[in-house]
Image (cartoon, rainbow, N blue to C red):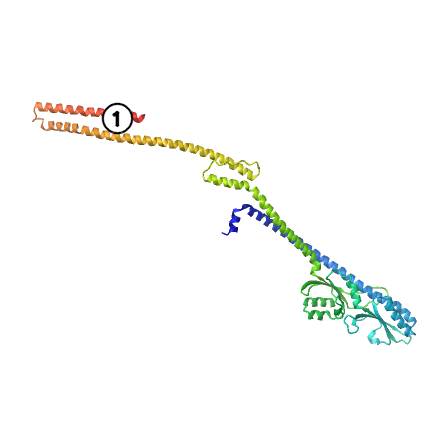
Amino acid sequence: MSKVTKFLAKTLSFRLSLRIIAALALLLMLALMTMFYFSRKAVREEALQNAGQTLEAMVENIDNVLLSVEQAAGNIYWKMMGQANQPELMETYAHKLVECNPYITDSRIIWDADSNTVGAMAVWTTPRKVGSSKENAVATFRLPFYDKNQKLNVLAIDVSLTLLSKIVLEEKPSPNSICALLGREGTIIIYPDSTRLNMNLIALAEKFNHPTLVEAAEAMLAGETGYKEVMVKGKTCYAFYKPFKQTEVRGRAMTDLGWSAGIIYPEEDIFGSYNRLVWTVLIIAVVGLGLLFVFCRLFIHHQLMPLRRLGKSAQIIAEGRYDEPIPESRNKDEVGRLQNHFHAMQQSLAQHMGELQQLSNTLKERGEVLQAAYEQAQGADRIKTNFLYNMSDQMKAPVNSILQSVKTICQHGSELTDEDTSKMVDEIMRRGEKVTALLNQLIADSEKLESEKIE
């Protein structure tokens, strides 16, 4: 048996404390798991709600920028129509748009445009690069109009996607979140890294081996609303997305841009505080259980102290020292009552053992007396035996002589003279008297021994 096993077998307070802490730990674990489950669920629902609100705000901010450009274009449009016969003045009006709207980076008129390509409605075109730099990407709003010769012309207004990205990203919901806006073909319209603008998100995700991000991008292009768990740079993130819809305003040309807004939350941003709280609670629970174990150990050890004293007293009593004093307890609990009962039992046992000891001494004394009487009886028996032997030995010769004389008289009485017969009769009488005297002596000695035995 190992030292730990021996220690556990001998230490009741440790085992009781360990069982109490194990039961409390089980209950606490179940309570914490339930609390963590529902709190994590609540955090996820709150994250979904915040993501939805953020996407709504993002779409609204972008749409406000687009709407302001459209309204600015519409305001200048009517002035330009009054000067349709003055192309230079119309170019001046177009350039004025850049000065009056901070989101517009360029404004120009495309004369004699192809009607098959432009169309007859105001529309936002697919974002494109301007120049060799990837950062110079713009989205163009085209407003067609006819001059006095009924030729189709287009007022083209460029909005910098880099500037639009900065405006949107300033309002990102968390420090590490990423806001993005995808075009109809999956091109990146708004992204924190301006070098990624106008690049295809699906191709980019496939290049860096992010299959979950590819699934999220495909869902965005399909016009879905929801969220997916994605892996970005080895970190778990949640991608929330919804289609970009323009706000309906009177006089506004409503077209399906095919854009989709998305926001990527790292799991740390969503569950970071929650995870830190979980670890804090677990540490507090472990430390609390440890302190509770120490307290239970000390408390139970103190409560079991009378039992340890009783154990030592019982061991001493088992060794034969029945007069070992056991103090009475003032406690009214089970241990106190046990100690008092043990005290009463010890006193009763000591009393009975005293009585048994006294009885043993009395029996021992009586045994010694009986032993002496027995030895005396044995001595008397030996004396009696020797006496009888001597008496019988003394009577043997007279009896034999009497028998011989009687035998002679009986067999040869006719041959004997009167004198011989008389002598033999006298001898028989003398021997008979001697035997009688010996028998009287034997009777007297027997009575004397009997009287001594009775005394």
- The reply to whether residue 226 is visible in this rendering is no
The kind of residue tagged 1 is Ser
Question: In the shown orientation, is residue 50 left or right of residue 251?
Answer: left
* Nearer the observer, 260 or 305: 305
Question: In the shown orientation, is residue 368 left or right of residue 20?
Answer: left
Element type where label 1 sits in the image: helix
* Residue 360 horizontal/vertical position (percent): 40, 33
Q: Quadrant of the C terminus?
A: top left
Residue pointed to by mark 1: 446
Q: Compared to 198, does 303 lie above or below?
A: above
Question: In the shown orientation, is residue 410 left or right of residue 383?
Answer: left
* Residue 25 horizontal/vertical position (percent): 61, 50
* Nearer the observer, 24 or 92: 92
In the image, what residue occupies the spot 71% across and 57% down? 45
> Mark 1 packing: few (<14 Cα in 10 Å), some, or many (20+)?
some
* Residue 293 horizontal/vertical position (percent): 60, 48
Question: In the shown orientation, is residue 180 left or right of residue 433?
Answer: right
Q: Compared to 357, does 54 lie above or below?
A: below
* Residue 211 horizontal/vertical position (percent): 68, 68
